[in-house]
Image (spheres, grey):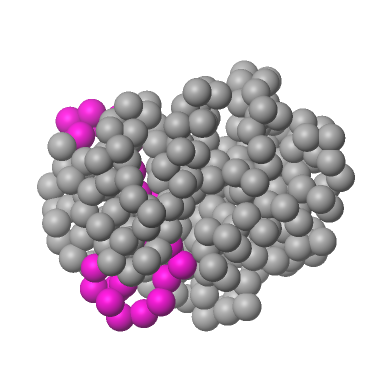
C-alpha cells in the first residue's frame, strides 16, 4: 500500500532533532511519497538538504507562502522565479491568501498570488493553494486566471460543500488532512458527497495533527488517522483510499 502525503513541511525546525526518526516512522507506516511546499527563501537550503537525503521519496515545490508576504515580497518572488528557472520542481506552492494573521498585506498577497499563478502556467506546473479566512479573495483571482493550464490542490480544505464544488470547478483537488478528524471540523459531514477523484491526502506536518494527536506536533506517519477517517466516510478499505488518492496525486504532480 503506497500512501502519499501531498503537503508536509519535513524541513521544519520542529523536526530539527529527530528528522530521520520521523521519516523512518512515516516510511514504515507506508508513506513513501512526500510533497514538500516552500515557505520563503530562508528555508530553501533546508529543503534541498532534505531532498538530497531522501531523493526517492521527497518532491519539492517552490513558492512564497502568503503569511510570509512582507514589504520585501518582490525580492522573495525574484528568488522563486530564479529557483524555478534553475531546476525542476513539482508545483508552485504553497501560495494564496491568508487573512487570519494579517489583513494589512492583502494587496501584496493578491499581487504575489497572481504572479505565482503566472509562473506556474509558464512552467506548466500545478499550484498548491493556502487559504485562510480568504475564500472570496482566492476565488476572485481563480476566476480571473481560470484556464486549462490552471490546476492544482486546494491545500487543507476547510470550506463548505458549495466552496468545495467551486474549488473543484477550477481544476483543484481538495487536500484533506487532520481537520477531517476534528469534532468541529465540519468537512466530514459532507465529504461523502464529493467524488473521491477530487481528493488527496495530506498532513501539513508539523501543524494540524489529527485526533488522537490533536494539539501535538504532527508528522507524516499520522496520515494513517486521516486514511482511517476517509475509509469510514467513503465506506472503502484503507488500501482503496490510499490507491485512489495516490493516483490523484500523480494526476496533479505528474510523478
Q: Residue at x 34, y 33 (%)?
A: 139
Q: Is residue 82 magenta?
A: yes
Left or right: residue 156 versus residue 56 is left
Q: Front-most of 148 and 250?
A: 148
Residue 37 seen in the current view: yes
Q: Residue at x 52, y 80 (%)?
A: 52
Left or right: residue 146 versus residue 15 is left
When the figure is inspected, residue 54 is found, relative to residue 228, above or below; the finding is below
The image shows residue 248 at horizontal and vertical percentages of 62, 55
Instruction: Give the quadrant of residue 142.
Output: top left
Residue 38 seen in the current view: no
Instruction: Give the quadrant of residue 82.
Output: bottom left
Q: Residue at x 43, y 52 (%)?
A: 151
| Quadrant for the C terminus in the image | bottom right
Instruction: Give the quadrant of residue 181.
Output: top right
The image shows residue 66 at horizontal and vertical percentages of 30, 44
| Quadrant for the N terminus in the image | bottom right
Instruction: Please report the bounds of the magenta region as a residue range.
Output: 81-106
Q: Residue furthest right?
A: 237
The image shows residue 173 at horizontal and vertical percentages of 53, 45
When the figure is inspected, residue 122 is found, relative to residue 169, above or below; the finding is below
When the figure is inspected, residue 221 is found, relative to residue 176, above or below; the finding is below
The image shows residue 141 at horizontal and vertical percentages of 27, 39
Q: Is residue 162 magenta?
A: no
Q: Front-most of 33 and 216?
A: 33
Amino acid at each position: 500500500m503506497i500512501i502519499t502525503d501531498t503537503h508536509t513541511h519535513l524541513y521544519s525546525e520542529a523536526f530539527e532533532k529527530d528528522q530521520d526518526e520521523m521519516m523512518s516512522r512515516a516510511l514504515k507506516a507506508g508513506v513513501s511519497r512526500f510533497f514538500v511546499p516552500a515557505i520563503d527563501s530562508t528555508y530553501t537550503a533546508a529543503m534541498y538538504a532534505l531532498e538530497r537525503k531522501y531523493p526517492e521519496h521527497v518532491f519539492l515545490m517552490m513558492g512564497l507562502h502568503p503569511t510570509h508576504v512582507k514589504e520585501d515580497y518582490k525580492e522573495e518572488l525574484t528568488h522563486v522565479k530564479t529557483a524555478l528557472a534553475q531546476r525542476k520542481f513539482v508545483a508552485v506552492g504553497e501560495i494564496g491568501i491568508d487573512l487570519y494573521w494579517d489583513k494589512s498585506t492583502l494587496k501584496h498577497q493578491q499581487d504575489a498570488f497572481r504572479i505565482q499563478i503566472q509562473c506556474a502556467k509558464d512552467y506548466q506546473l500545478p499550484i498548491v493553494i493556502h487559504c485562510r479566512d480568504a475564500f472570496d479573495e482566492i476565488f476572485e483571482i481563480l476566476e480571473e486566471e481560470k484556464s486549462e493550464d490552471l490546476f492544482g490542490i486546494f491545500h487543507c480544505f476547510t470550506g463548505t460543500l458549495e466552496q468545495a464544488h467551486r474549488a473543484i470547478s477550477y481544476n483543484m483537488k481538495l487536500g484533506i488532512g487532520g481537520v477531517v478528524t476534528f469534532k468541529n471540523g465540519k468537512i466530514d459531514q459532507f465529504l461523502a458527497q464529493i467524488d473521491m477523484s477530487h481528493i488527496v491526502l495530506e498532513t501539513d506536518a508539523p501543524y494540524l495533527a489529527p485526533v488522537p494527536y490533536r494539539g501535538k506536533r504532527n508528522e507524516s506517519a499520522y496520515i494513517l488517522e486521516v486514511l482511517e477517517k476517509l475509509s469510514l466516510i467513503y465506506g472503502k478499505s484503507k488500501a482503496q483510499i490510499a490507491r485512489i488518492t495516490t493516483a490523484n496525486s500523480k494526476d496533479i504532480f505528474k510523478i
